[in-house]
Amino acid sequence: MARWLKALVAVFLLPLCVGAFQTLARVISASGGMATFWLPFLCGAACWVVVFWLLPRPMWLYVFGHELTHALAAWLCGGRVKRMRVSARGGHVLVSKTNWWVTLAPYFVPIYVVLVLVGFGLGHLLWGWGRHPEWLYLFLGAAYAFHVTLTWQVLQTRQPDITSQGWFFSLVIIVLGNLLVPMLGLGLLTGAVPLGTVLGWWWQETARVWLWLSRVI
């Protein structure tokens, strides 16, 4: 897809970003009373923030997750992973098929959140970990904060993934993806808001943005 066409697509995605932001605020408000979720989740996030500011940052771990997400995204698109290189200074993965999803997925898919969920699910099947969901929420908070802080850090430097897709298109996709993950995930984790309700709110909020734009234009 030509860059000018991607930029045009990004313009039309902006109302979806605004709608997703407003919907996320509604979901957070609706799940605000879930002390069993928010307390351990925020404690986990705070623990990681302390590590982020005071201790050496585990860049190898971040790079590994970044390249692994590239590889999984390519695999989901029917591609093959030919080679993967990881170091604390950077990494590279060679795949047989690439597109905007494969290129940008690591910036909005919190892979370690996914791994925590998979690990906890296996632990629940084998050892009944579901009796203590507060530990899940604690590690989810730390994993999500890990994703947000280190993704923000690497975006401060020149990223070939971003420049290859165009900065405007890439940033809109990254913002939208990072809004959708908590917007959809919070309702599923807390059970406070059904998924259908969340999607309905997103439709309503996005429609309001389009209506406002039609009046302004």
Image: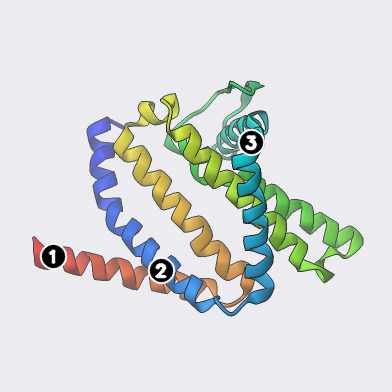
Q: Check contact, mark 3 vs mark 2: CB within 8 A.
A: no
Sooner in the amino-acid sequence: mark 1 or mark 3: 3
Quadrant into which the C terminus falls: bottom left
Quadrant into which the N terminus falls: top left
Q: CA distance from mark 3 to mark 2?
A: 28 Å
Residue occupying the point 62% across, 55% down: 45
Q: Quadrant of residue 75?
A: top right
Q: Quadrant of residue 203?
A: bottom left
Which residue ends up furthest to the right in the rendered image? 127
Q: Is residue 124 above or below residue 29?
A: above
Front position in the image: 94 or 153: 153
Q: Secondary structure at mark 2?
A: helix
Viewer-nearest of discs 1 and 3: 3
Residue occupying the point 65% across, 75% down: 35
Front position in the image: 12 or 78: 12
Q: Which residue is mark 2?
A: 23
Q: Which residue is mark 1?
A: 214
Q: Is residue 158 above or below residue 217?
A: above
Residue 163 coordinates in the image, percent (x, y) = 36, 27
Residue occupying the point 45% across, 56% down: 179
Q: Is residue 107 above or below residue 165?
A: below
Q: Is residue 63 above or below residue 197?
A: above
Q: Amino acid at mark 3?
A: Gly
> Is residue 140 visible from the viewing direction of this image?
yes
Q: Is residue 72 left or right of residue 30?
A: right
Q: Amino acid at mark 2?
A: Thr
Mark carried by residue 65: 3
> Is residue 102 visible from the viewing direction of this image?
no
Q: Residues within 10 Å of mark 1 (few under 14, many from 20)?
A: few
Q: Check contact, mark 1 vs mark 2: CB within 8 A.
A: no
Q: CA distance from mark 1 to mark 3?
A: 42 Å
